[in-house]
Each structure stands twice: as C-alpha cells, then as structure tokens.
Image (tube, rainbow, N blue to C red):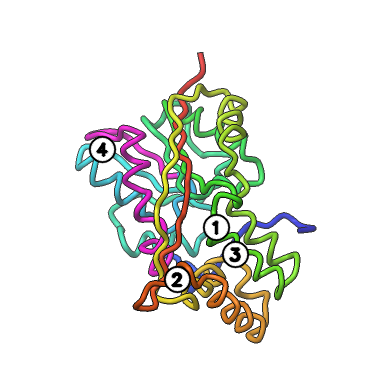
Amino acid sequence: MTRRETFQVSSDAAEVYESRFVPALFAQWTPLVVEQAAVTEGQRILDVACGTGVVARTAAERVGPHGRVVGLDLNPGMLAVARRIRPDLAWCLGDAGALPFPDDTFDAALCQMALMFFPNRRQALAEMNRVARGFTVCVPAALPDQPAYRLLVEVAARHAGPEAVSLLNTYWSCGDRDELTALVGEAGATVDRCTTHTGTARFSSPETFVDTEINGSPLAERIEPATRDAIRRDVRTELARYVEADGTVSAPLVAHVVTGRHGH
C-alpha cells in the first residue's frame, strides 16, 4: 500500500464485525486472553483497540462491580456498537500509540487481534506497558501456519490484485512468534508467558467465509461485485476440504497469546 491504512470501517461494517466476526472468530480467544492475563475481581482493565467490545465485556464479568473496565478504539463505528451493547462500560475514542491515561492506571491492558493493525506496534506495546502493570496481546500466527486462510488470500490475489492482498495479509503480519516476543522486549517489557493455540473459524458456508472477511475490512468498498463473486466461486472449490457435510466451514485458526510485564 502506498498510504497509511487506518482500517476505518463504517457503522454497518462494525455491525457485521459484531454479528459475524465475534461469534465466528473472536469469542473463542477472549477467555484465553483474560485467563492468561489473570484478570480477577476488583481489577482495573483496559481493552486496547476494543472493536465492538468482546474482550471488555468478558473482562467486566471477571472484575465484577468493584472493578473497572475501559474500552479504547480509534474507530467511532466500532465504539458505537460497543456502547449499544454495554452502555454501562466506559468507551473511549483514542489511539493505541498515545494512550490518554497516566502511568500505571490499570492492572492489565488487553489487546486481542489488533496489534497487526497499528502503524507503530512497538510504541503501542510500550504505551500498554506504561499505563498498566502488565499486558496480554493475542495475534494470529503467520499466514504459512494458516492453511485455510492462505487459500483465501491466494484467491483474492488472483482476482483483486495487490491492494487486496496487502489488506488481507495485514492480519498475519505479527504472526512470527520469535519476532513477537522480541517486540515485547523492545517495548521495554519482560515476556512473562507466550502460548500458541489452535482454534476453529466457523462459517455457515464458504461464501459466508469470504463475505465475512471482505465485509469486515476496507476491501468491501474497493472491489466490484463481479470480483467478489469470482472470489466466492473459487474459494468454494479451494476450501472443499474444510467444508462439512452440512455445507458449513470449519477452518483452523492459529494464534499466539503473549503476556508482558514491566521490565526490570
């Protein structure tokens, strides 16, 4: 891409994110993130790049009425959906690279499936390390470790060209485990724990798989209907091995969860 991509999405796309991405992809990772971060009752938790708030909502259940959860995102559309679902939580418009909080405001900062979108990832981690006593970040593993998604990106490249590939490849750009842990150190934190998990992305059909990935990204507004149809058609063929007897898709999804603490 020749310009900085901010991954701003419309309110409609944010609703798609909540209704499709969250149950199909993200809900399964949230308990792992919250558990590895050791979130407990009464704590102060920051959900960085909270999207529609799935991590914040889960953390709120853990911290209870005496705790505090703040969700921060750069995208007003995402925050509007988050606020609609949980108006009782605090939602803040802000940049992960310049968190608007004093040092050690929170017990933990959580960031699920978002680090790869930050223009300065080291700075974002350093900011989490500054405002919280510890942080836990979840990112998808590298594309070579994602057999189903690798096929999707290959089909998109065939039909939509290099910009589509750049947009879709962003999801996997933090997936090298050694580079991820090194980045935590560069941000001034000590790696407390790094784990790798294999989950499952579930969709009602190959076409829904394609539409969910496209509609949840800026690519939705940058391709013609005919191009989308061609991607949908070829993905049905390429992903046949992941299609169940009832037509649903069960695609493996690998992710790393890393926890950092204040460096000594």
Residue that lies at the very extreme toward the right in this rendered image? 2
Question: What residue sits 55% from the left and 45% below the top?
Answer: 115
Label 1 vs label 4: CA separation? 40 Å
- Image: 95 above or below 79: above
Question: What residue sits 31% from the left and 46% below the top?
Answer: 31
- Image: 1 above or below 155: above
Residue receiving disc 2: 16
The answer to the question of whether label 1 and label 3 lie on touching residues, with beta carbons closer than 8 A, is yes
Upstream in the sequence, badge 1 or badge 4?
Answer: 4
Left or right of residue 103: residue 45: left
Depth check: give the residue in front, 50 or 234. Answer: 234
What amino acid does circle 4 point to?
Answer: Gly
Asked if the magenta segment contains residue 22, the reply would be yes
Label 2 vs label 4: CA separation? 30 Å
Residue receiving disc 4: 67
Depth check: give the residue in front, 41 or 68. Answer: 41
Residue 98 placed where, x, y %? 58, 39
Label 1 vs label 3: CA separation? 7 Å
Residue 53 placed where, x, y %? 38, 54
The kind of secondary structure element at disc 3 is: helix
Question: What residue sits 65% from the left and 70% below the top?
Answer: 155
Q: What is the count of numbered marks?
A: 4
Query: How would you rate the neighbour count of disc 4 (Cα within 10 Å): few for under 14, some for 14-19, many for 20 or more?
Result: some
Question: What residue sits 53% from the left and 24% below the top?
Answer: 189
Residue receiving disc 1: 147
Residue receiving disc 3: 151
Upstream in the sequence, badge 3 or badge 2?
Answer: 2
Q: Which residues are magenta?
A: 18-47
Query: Given this view, does label 1 or label 4 mark the residue nearer the observer?
Result: 1
